[in-house]
Amino acid sequence: MFVAFQSQAFKSNMQYGFSLLGGTNYAQFSGGSDFAHASFYKHNSGTGAFNFNARYFIDERWSVQSGIGFTSIGFEVGFAQNYSLVKNDHFINSSTNISVTQIPLMAIYNFKPDCKNKSWLVGAGFNFMFSDKNVNTTVYPTQSKNEIYLMPQLSNYSQTITAGKFSTTNLQLMVGREKKFNKGNRLSLNVVWNIGLAGDIAQSKVNYTLDGTDYEHIFSNQGHYAGLSVSYLFSTKASRAKAEMLKQL
């Protein structure tokens, strides 16, 4: 009798919150020389995301989440140099980033909670990413805060970033663990994968001369990223009312 009453007590409701993600944005080699100088390297750039979320609960298991958020895509290249065993100056970097707005739309399924009201969840859906401005920027060693100038043997260095206005669709997947508190607010820790479906949305061309040889490498970015996200949903009037009702049973 109690179980039946509890299941009928659920009402569809909307909860609002936010999420923070820290992760890695992937860029791949796409042109130019496939041979690089021994000291040159390309890293995937670090990225973060901040989302405002709205999650509609159809029942205790199924929900749909959307919202709006802000992230970045970018490129990171650099060189290894002779270094001190005392100072941490082995690598010098040249990093560039492009700001992106995103609107995710995801279906989420929560598995049966344990005795502490914690449950596993999985999610899948689409993430719509867009940028409303063109980017055509060239970075030179002489610019402030650029470490490349520390290598006097390096010459003719430049990194040119190009991206047009874009609006792309991405596949987004999520796996996580969620805690539902007594008042209905929720805290979750999730692993998120974002997979670009529209091809290249930004490009980086790197030119440099080392040991008398000219090099040119081209890297492209399709918006792929992966990372760890912390999400919080605030309780609502409906969730607090249900919590009070269950206390009285």
Image (cartoon, grey):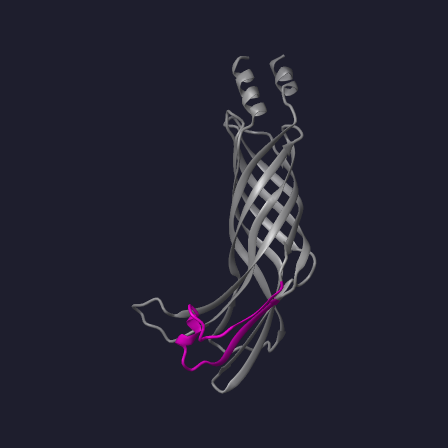
Question: Where residue 214 appears, x then y in whole percent?
Answer: 54, 83
Question: Where residue 78 appears, x then y in whole percent?
Answer: 47, 70
Question: Where residue 181 appears, x then y in whole percent?
Answer: 50, 28
Q: Please name whichever residue, 111 or 20, is drawn nearer the observer in this view of the structure.
A: 20
Q: Is 4 located above or below residue 217 in the figure?
A: above
Identity of the residue drawn at 57% across and 20% down: 242
Residue at the outermost bottom position: 212
Q: Please name whichever residue, 133 or 222, is drawn nearer the observer in this view of the structure.
A: 133
Question: Where residue 66 appears, x then y in whole percent?
Answer: 63, 41
Tag count in the figure? Answer: 0
User: Which quadrant of the figure contains the N terminus?
Assistant: top right
Residue 2 appears in which quarter of the rendering?
top right
Q: Please name whichever residue, 129 or 40, is drawn nearer the observer in this view of the structure.
A: 129
Magenta stretch encompasses residue 135: yes
**Segment tinted magenta in the rendering:** 134-162
User: Which quadrant of the figure contains the C terminus?
Assistant: top right
Magenta stretch encompasses residue 222: no
Identity of the residue drawn at 53% across and 29% down: 235
Residue at the outermost left position: 86
Identity of the residue drawn at 67% across and 59% down: 166
